[in-house]
Amino acid sequence: MSDAKIDLPAADPDYLRLPDPEALRRPFSTHKPRILILYGSLRQVSFSRLLAMEAKRLLEHFGAEVKVFDPSGLPLPDDAPVNHPKVQELRDLSEWSEGQVWVSPERHGTLTGIMKAQIDWIPLSIGAIRPTQGKTLAVMQVSGGSQSFNAVNAMRLLGRWMRMITIPNQSSVAKAWQEFDGNGRMKPSSYYERVVDVCEELVKFTLLTRDISGYLTDRYSERKEAAVKAVNLKAM
């Protein structure tokens, strides 16, 4: 392999960093992975909530500490101040979490407004802090009819926008009203097995990335931008 220097005239060498394998081998934290679950329905019999609770049990089995946010009472985005109690509760839980699960019904071919409102209340950035950057994410949906992936695909797009590490696996439960018993527990099926897969994978990815998320999301453009801002502040 040639050691000749590669010509990168458009790049600033002061902010280029070679990937450091040692930075990816930091000691694992010993506390339980912290997972937040959001669901997108307020119906009295809500299959997205039932699926969220099924995921909670599985995640706890796999060793996670899990909290579920109840969206009831959350105002529409921009229709209340950020110090609204439900907004603060959601933001505090998001900050606490190291990974998240988003569970939405499909409505009009996408995620519900209730689900989107929760995501919209979580800020992309607060000053120099990006509250969701580097956190893991799993997406699930329920449908009243045949299997669809519109809601999970939309949530994947939102997860990328929030700079989250969205795991490869996902769950889409078709005809959800057939998949839960009278006690609200999910019946044995291939759909249930996929939910197990998703929860197991999320915990693994969270354990793998939570201690190095800062390094994984440290990027050239932001290093350069921060340096420029620091110079401008000194000049003021």
Image (cartoon, grey):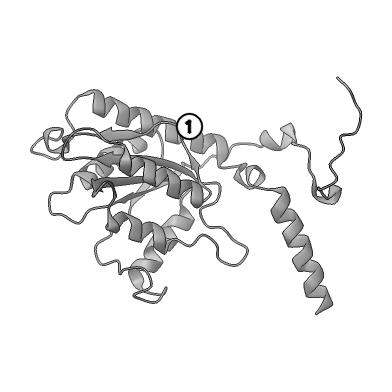
Residue 199 picture quarter: top left
Image quadrant containing the C terminus: bottom right
Q: Residue at x 25, y 45 (%)?
A: 106
Give coordinates of residue 88: x percent, y percent. Answer: 40, 68
Q: Residue flagged by tag 1: what amino acid is it? A: Lys
In the figure, 82 relative to 33: above or below?
Answer: below
Which quarter of the figure is the N terminus placed in? Answer: top right
Question: For the view shown, which residue lies furthest in the right direction?
Answer: 4
Q: Eyeballing the image, is 19 above or below 214?
A: above
Q: Position of residue 173 (x, y in %)?
A: 24, 34
The residue where tag 1 is placed is 204
Q: Quadrant of residue 118?
A: bottom left
Q: Is residue 164 left or right of residue 219?
A: left
**Disc 1: CA contacts within 10 A as few (<14), some (14-19) or many (>=20):** some
Q: At which x and y percent is residue 152?
A: 35, 41
Count of marks, rendered view? 1
Is residue 99 in view?
Answer: no
- Looking at the image, the residue that sits furthest to the top is 1
Q: Residue at 90% of width from left, 26% of height from top?
A: 3
Q: Is residue 58 visible?
A: yes
Answer with left or right where residue 146 lies relative to residue 40: left
From this viewpoint, which residue is outermost toward the bottom? 236
| Residue at horizontal 27 percent and vertical 46 percent from the top | 109
x then y, percent, for residue 151: 32, 44
**In-front residue for pair 213/79:** 79
Left or right? Give the position of 210 relative to 5: left
Relative to 26, is 224 on the left or the right?
Answer: right
Of helix, strand and loop, which one carries label 1?
helix
